[in-house]
Image: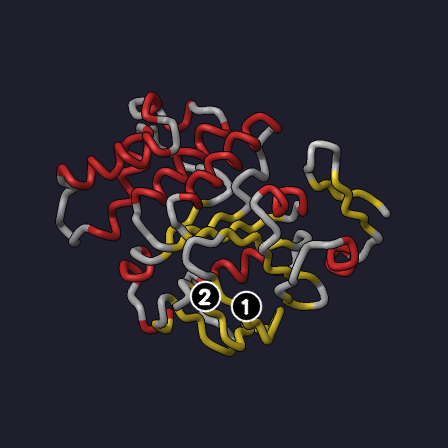
Amino acid sequence: MTVLTLSGVTIGHGVPLVGGIDAGLAPGSVTSLLGPNGVGKTTLIRTLMGLIPPLAGRVLVSGEDIVSLSRPAIARRIAYVPQGYAGDFAYTVRDLVLMGRTAHLGVFASPGPADHDRVAAALSALGIADLADRDALRLSGGQRQLALIARALAQEADLVVMDEPTASLDLANRLMVQDRIRALAATGRTVLISTHEPEQAFAFGDRAWLLGWGGFAVPASLDSATLSRLYGIALAVETTPSGRQVVGPA
């Protein structure tokens, strides 16, 4: 069974943006949602998370229609990592990650020892256990992203959706976060990463969903012709002597 299935889905805010989306995410896979800015990647993410309804079609989470699930039920199945932490309060990193346990608690319940153990495990898995008592507003950009990924990990959802998680990071922090995302996927989580950078998609493998002005597609591979159609410009995929794939003008 797929973790997530989109069947004949049309996305948009009242007015159709992209239609006929058919795709699925297999357990333990890493998939890049790739496309230019402004084509609807965030709208698609909001739709598959149940935040806005599809204009047509069905979104199935572990076989269940997402429109039939409550918000806590969705949160137990799908965790979300935004582009950055925009909090206004000085939470510690531990408290920020502990928020990921909310979906597993009753209305008036407080986190118990098991919840704190899961938070400690998530911090350790992301390599930031030493930041647990730090003010989340006083971290580097890369450290904040790792804290948000740790929050998603503590949520214990099968699917982790990331909306351009390295968009505002410098090179060192971007590479650090990419490395931790690969480690997260190795634990068996299913990961969907929104990005507009082909080379980031290559960093996680070439399994991808493409969303462009021409619609939605699931390509067999990310080759020069596919990326050229997606971005509307002649592009070439080249392999460096170290084996890394890069994209540039044809």
Residue at the image position 58 percent from the left and 48 percent from the top: 205
Residue 143 position, x and y percent, is: 45, 28
Label 2 sits on residue: 52
* Amino acid type at mark 1: His
Which of these two is toward me, 122 or 223?
223
Q: Are marks 1 and 2 in contact (CB under 8 Å)?
A: yes
What residue appears at the point 32 percent right and 56 percent down from the top-left corner?
75
Question: The residue tagged with tag 1: helix, strand or loop?
Answer: strand
Residue 175 position by quadrant: top right
Q: Give the mark, 1 or 2, whose residue is nearer the N terminus.
A: 1
Camera-nearest residue between 153 and 202: 202
Q: Residue at x 71, y 64 (%)?
A: 213
User: SS of the residue at dot 2?
Assistant: loop
Q: Amino acid at mark 2?
A: Ile
Q: Quadrant of the N terminus?
A: bottom left
The disc at residue 13 is 1
Measured in 3D between alpha carbons, the distance from the residue under mark 1 to the one under mark 2, in whole angstroms, is 8 Å
